Image (cartoon, rainbow, N blue to C red):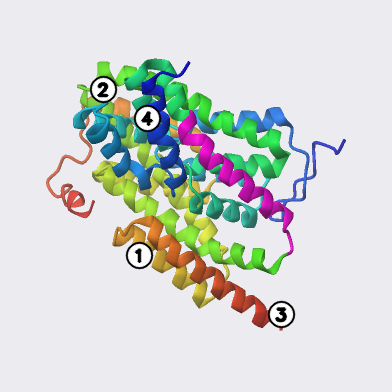
Amino acid sequence: MLDSRLIGLIIVFAPLSLLSFGGGQAIVADIQYQTVEVHKWLSNSEFVDMFALSRAAPGPSTLISALIGWQVDGFAGALVAALAMYIPSSAVVYFAASWWQRSQTSPLRIAIERGLAPVAIGLVFAGVVAVVQAAQMDALALATLGMCTLILYFTKFSSYRLLFIVGAVYGALLYFGIDVFAQPGANLFYWWS
Amino acid sequence: MPPDTPVKTPGSPTPPQYVPILELLGVFLRLGILAIGGGVQAFMYRDLVEVKRWIDDKAYITGLAIAQVLPGANPVNLALYFGLKLRGGLGATVAVLGMVVPAFCIILGMGYAYRQLAHLPATHFILIGVASVGVAATLAMGAKIAKRLDRNWNTALIALVTFGAVGVLRLPMVPVVLVVVPLSILLAYVAERRRAG
């Protein structure tokens, strides 16, 4: 059955699930507090590593809960922490979405739809700024970003293929030791980001 | 059973159509494995709206807003919302599992690999490159959807205020959303009433 560490994981992550507005971003600070200060499952530097990993990995950044669960109690911990993170919020979304689809023509629904759209767009661009700053993108990364944006905006090129191509090009640059933006002046971009 | 190869006319709103459950699983599995660097919404837009044409622009942006405003990871909420919309409860379950299970396995694998590779600068270098593709996908999607927003001052103002508050001033998102969303819905409701009456 559930041991006390697994129950601890549920107690930490299930309430945070309901507060995870906008995904992992909103609750990162509290995850740090609970897992490092309160329960002492991790050191601060371990926490930072896990945060970085959860951002670099595919899928939702709230999977940081699985990484922490793994650290606390192995595979069972990872599984329990991930479920505690997803089930409460998913239940809320499920019922909200069901209501949404039943009330097709209500004027309130139309107003909600029109009202939410600009907020969503604002948050999308805010997310871009947050990632660019968090990643401390250098000139090369910003150039990659600009070029890929143009490609994805104007063509039907597959975003997955682009991902692999960029990964491969970066790997090659590294392998052959080419420092593309090594001139003085390139550092100006650090100031911006 | 409805035909599962509907006629696809570019640009027209998507008609309700039959989405094979395995194809749904395939799309979300791929998203769960490959969508990196905060680009999930953008990758999903490309797959569901532009490639498969299962969802139209308007429905996508509604789903996006709901996924962002309700608690929960955006990618999981989006998978749940569109899975439910396309194939009901089964679709929602399949989409969420497709999104989470591979990512769950990958992140545990990465957690292990990271311990071995963390000291290599190459690890961080390549990840940054990959992340910039994720950001680029988000930018391209945002620009495409923004182009199709209602053209009026309310909409533009709300979008700018939200972006400014969260993206530039770095105010915490929850209070910002709690203020901006009711305001925006009220403005839309009043505008709708005026148009109707």
Q: Which residue is mark 1?
A: B164
Q: Chain of mark 1?
A: B
Q: Chain of mark 4?
A: A
Q: Nearer the viewer, mark 2 or mark 4?
A: 4
Magenta segment's dominant SS is helix
Q: Position of residue B12 (x, y in %)?
A: 72, 56
- Mark 2 falls on what kind of element? helix
Q: Are marks 3 and 4 on the same chain?
A: no
Give left or right: position of B145 versus A176. right
Q: Position of residue A116 (x, y in %)?
A: 54, 62
Q: Which residue is mark 4?
A: A167
For the C terminus of chain B, the quadrant is bottom right
How far is the residue under mark 1 from the one under mark 2?
40 Å
For the N terminus of chain B, the quadrant is top right
Q: Nearer the viewer, mark 3 or mark 1?
A: 3
Residue for point 37% across, 24% down: A69
Residue for point 55% across, 69% down: B185
- Vertical comparison of A14 with B141: above or below: above
Residue for point 54% across, 58% down: B145
Query: Which dot marks residue A175?
Result: 2
Residue for point 32% across, 17% down: B113
